[in-house]
Image (cartoon, rainbow, N blue to C red):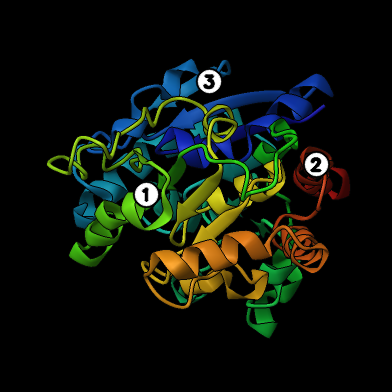
Amino acid sequence: MGRIVFTGIASRSIANWVPALHELRSRGHDVRSLLFPHIPDPDSQHLTDLGFEELGTFPIAEHLSRLPPQEATALAMSALALVRKSRPDVLLLTTCHAGPELVLAGVLATEPGRPVVIGCQHGFVQNWDVYWAQFPFDRFLVFGQRFQQVAPPHLASRISVGGLPKLDCIKPMPRDDFERDQRPMLFAAQMIPSDRLKSLLISLPLLTGRPVHIRPHPEHRTAFAGLPEDLRVVDCEEAIESQMDRYSLLLTTGSTTVLEAMAAGMPVVVLPEQRGEHYADAGIVASSMTGSDILVLARAQQTRDGRVRREQFLATATGSAVAGRTEIAAEAIEAPMRSA
């Protein structure tokens, strides 16, 4: 059996792949973590609770966007010593667009006898040009086939579908018709809100006749402080699949939570803010920031054509419209070990 080491800076990026990591361990592989907790991000606080043996932990004190290159290099070189000593077959990088994980991949690219280095997509919306400009990976796992298509031709053979294993933990929920389901709407935040977005959230309860609750992004937990009290802020540490069962509609922008709502069979409307337009192919992006447009889209998802369109989108974006993504990812991670 093989030795696999995975890296990450926050819980949400590792969570994408955790079901596959458990599956690989159940197949007899030795799976360990090499962590770079991103201290400015509260979502990094529980990285040591993942349930895997730790190879090492190297905290990132500065925000990743402001991390000096020499500090990223120092962290990577400290981690490199442990990689050399443990000699894994595969190094799986779950947040590899910047920081010490990217540096580590670059250093290993020139080493003899090194592990296979696999990079991972960590969110639905990505700045792909950043990846292609500096690509030190042997393989790169994307969520679904639609992301394979954005790779430049010279890298296409190194891009594999890994699915989005965390969606396998979400079971479709029986739901009443949207018109009859008068429960609150849940807004899942992706970034710090603009003034336009705040204004919409404040006006939505009156426009739609339904309360609006807000789930802040794990990295920006206080971003909605100061809004009216009826815009209740909910716990972003509670599993999103548990929260979705209490709401009639998910609202968001360019967030990966859209895929979670689709997997749950929950109506979802994406606002034309913060790169929400990337979901246009699913037919769920509002044409404007108005309550009437949101309701029109929510109702349209009750039709057969609306359901089929979402299922097709989910399949191309995550490797499957139903389950089986965990096995897709596990096979993609195992494949280089079998061919070695």
Q: Nearer the viewer, residue 93 or 297?
A: 297
**Badge 2: how crowded within 10 Å, few (<14), some, or many (20+)?**
some
Q: Tags 2 and 1 in contact by the CB under 8 Å rule?
A: no
Quarter-of-image position of residue 139: bottom right
Give the residue type that dot 3 points to: Leu
Cα distance in 3D space between marks 2 and 1: 35 Å
SS for dot 1: loop
Q: Which label sits on residue 189? A: 1
Residue 289 screen position, x and y as percent: 37, 70
Residue occupied by mark 2: 334
The percent position of residue 80, horizontal first and vertical second, equals 44, 39
Q: Which mark, by number, is residue 119?
A: none
Residue lying at 57% horizontally and 27% vertically, measured from the top left: 242
Question: What is the quadrant of the N terminus in the image?
Answer: top right
Q: How far apart are marks 2 and 3 (CA)?
A: 21 Å
| Of residues 319 and 86, the one drawn nearer to the viewer in this rendering | 319
- The residue closer to the viewer here, 42 or 38, is 42
Residue shown at 30% from the left, 54% from the top? 201
Mark 3 sits on what residue? 50
| Secondary structure of residue under mark 3 | loop
Mark closer to the chain start, 2 or 1: 1
Q: Is residue 308 visible?
A: yes
Residue at 61% x, 46% y is 261
Callout 1 amino acid: Ala
Q: Is 225 positioned to the left or the right of 78 in the image?
A: left
Between circles 2 and 3, the one closer to the viewer is 3
